[in-house]
Amino acid sequence: MAKVDVLLGLQWGDEGKGKVIDVLTPHYDIVTRFQGGPNAGHTLEFDGQKYVLRSIPSGIFNGDNINIIGNGVVLNPALFKAEAESLASAGYDLTKRLFISKKAHLIMPTHCVLDAAYEAAKGASKVGTTGKGIGPAYTDKVSRNGLRVGDIGDNFMEKYEKAKERHEKMILDLGFPCDIEEAEKQWFEGVEFMKKFRFVDSEHLVNQYIAEGKNILCEGAQGTMLDVDFGSYPFVTSSNTICAGACSGLGISPRSIGDVYGIFKAYCTRVGAGPFPTELFDETGNEMCERGHEFGSVTGRRRRCGWIDLVALKYAVMINGVTRLIMMKSDVLDSFDTVKACVAYEMDGREIDYFPFEVCDKKITPVYKEFKGWKRDMSKMTSADEFPEEFTAYIQFIEQQLGVPVWLVSLGPDREQTIFM
Ligand code: GDP
Ligand code: IMO
Ligand code: MG
């Protein structure tokens, strides 16, 4: 029986999941998404081309492997159509090798309006969502009102109209405008387009692949600190971004899980509102943002930047059972005289070494360990033997703190700028 490997973000998203999934894909027969939706923006670069994927797994660029959108995903047909068409025009026709779970839920145009309406109603305490209707779509799923991919067919219009009517009442109650004429037109075009793809009972299919000994890689979206249960609630997304999410989002047993790849940046970023203990508001933070091109791939928003947070990372490693660490964007720190890593928090005048429940309510001051910067351009290095000793010391400290080996280091956005340790 094959094992299913899971790659997931350990921070607040945008760690570089898309790039590494693409790098690892040649070793796998099947790549799957198991949660999230078009709030994700996964960037890949190779042969001088750049692609940003939102709902489609990042495994599609490799030959003829199979890609699956699992039941835990929420899908907007209009955005899916745009994404698949743009890939088709780049020479990647996915109709034969991208399967969609019948149980994946659909994001309706009114979900996007509700997302905006709830944010407006929250005022200053808004989450800063991506505006893609994620929260309202998952709310409908959990409250047993959702519309699923498998519903596309008989009585679909009836189900759609019923859900839309319910949403419109809610939007009216919130005193928010609702003009969805154009969005609705595109949405139905998207629904038609989706019919070109195979709708599958993905839980059966994935378990069949496991029994056949196929290699399967699951691609997480968002990051552990955005998990609806374990992240910095309420400043989180609405799905389980953690390893367990791969089980519920695909219908596989925890016993099927093999390696858990935990991916993080050599520093830390966050987009949207919510606590970020190591956030920098100074020149150093600006330099990280500029050198790392830290602007959201979905919304274009400037990402908040700060030093690596080993307290939060330790928490993420624990929850996910990470077996291999992947460190991204190490090159961004190449110019710094000093590099810092947060090893504890100060809260209520006391030093703590765990990620606290009160993270949104209390003032948290990071306690740092400082490292001498390596001050060397690492972006063209091709093996760990070339690493400056200051950089090696930084990695070794992280490994020792997290208790898991760093297995891969990324030194630039391109596929080639990847070093296996
Ligand atoms: P994802 O959502 O986790 O897939 O990450 P995003 O694609 O949203 O953001 C990661 C960004 O960093 C993208 O623009 C990547 O092209 C870029 N990137 C990935 N790895 C590296 C790296 O090692 N160095 C640099 N400088 N950029 C990287
Ligand atoms: P990838 O997969 C970074 C953030 C939003 C907001 C919060 C809730 O590219 O790493 P939502 O639209 O999900 O209801 O927004 O979560 N967020 C992300 N931040 N990367 C992502 O995805 C994100 N997806 C959602 O900014 O703070
Ligand atoms: Mg992203």
Image (spheres, rainbow, N blue to C red):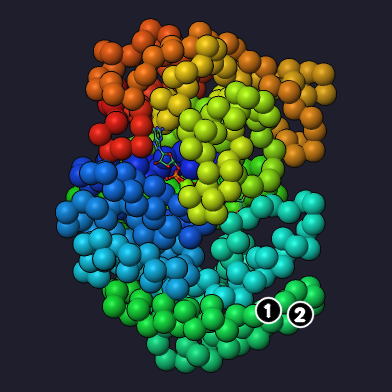
Residue 61 at x, y percent in the picture: 24, 53
Position of 69 relative to 326 (above/below): below
Closer to the chain start, of discs 2 and 1, is 2
Mark 1 surroundings within 10 Å by alpha-carbon count, few (fewer than 14), some (14 through 19), many (20 or more): some
Q: Which residue sits at x=39%, y=53%?
A: 52
Image quadrant where residue 280 sits: top right
Asked if one can make out residue 142 in the rendered structure from this viewpoint, the answer is: no
Q: Is residue 281 left or right of residue 54?
A: right
Residue 332 at x, y percent in the picture: 45, 26
Amino acid found under the numbered disc labelled 1: Cys
Q: Which residue sits at x=59%, y=43%?
A: 302
Contact, mark 2 vs mark 1 (Cβ under 8 Å): yes
Mark 2 surroundings within 10 Å by alpha-carbon count, few (fewer than 14), some (14 through 19), many (20 or more): few
Q: Which mark is residue 178?
A: 1
Task: Depth check: give the residue in front, 413 or 154.
Answer: 413
Position of 232 relative to 363 (above/below): below
Position of 239 relative to 200 (above/below): above
Q: Is residue 118 left or right of residue 214?
A: right
Q: Which residue sits at x=52%, y=33%?
A: 290
| Mark-to-mark CA distance, 2 and 1 | 8 Å
| Secondary structure of the residue carrying numbered label 1 | loop
Q: Which mark is residue 172?
A: 2
Position of 78 relative to 358 (above/below): below
Question: Between tags 2 and 1, which lies in front?
Answer: 1
Ligand 2 closer than 8 Å to label 2 CB: no
Residue 25 at x, y percent in the picture: 25, 46
Amino acid found under the numbered disc labelled 2: Leu
Image quadrant where residue 299 sits: bottom right
| Secondary structure of the residue carrying numbered label 2 | helix
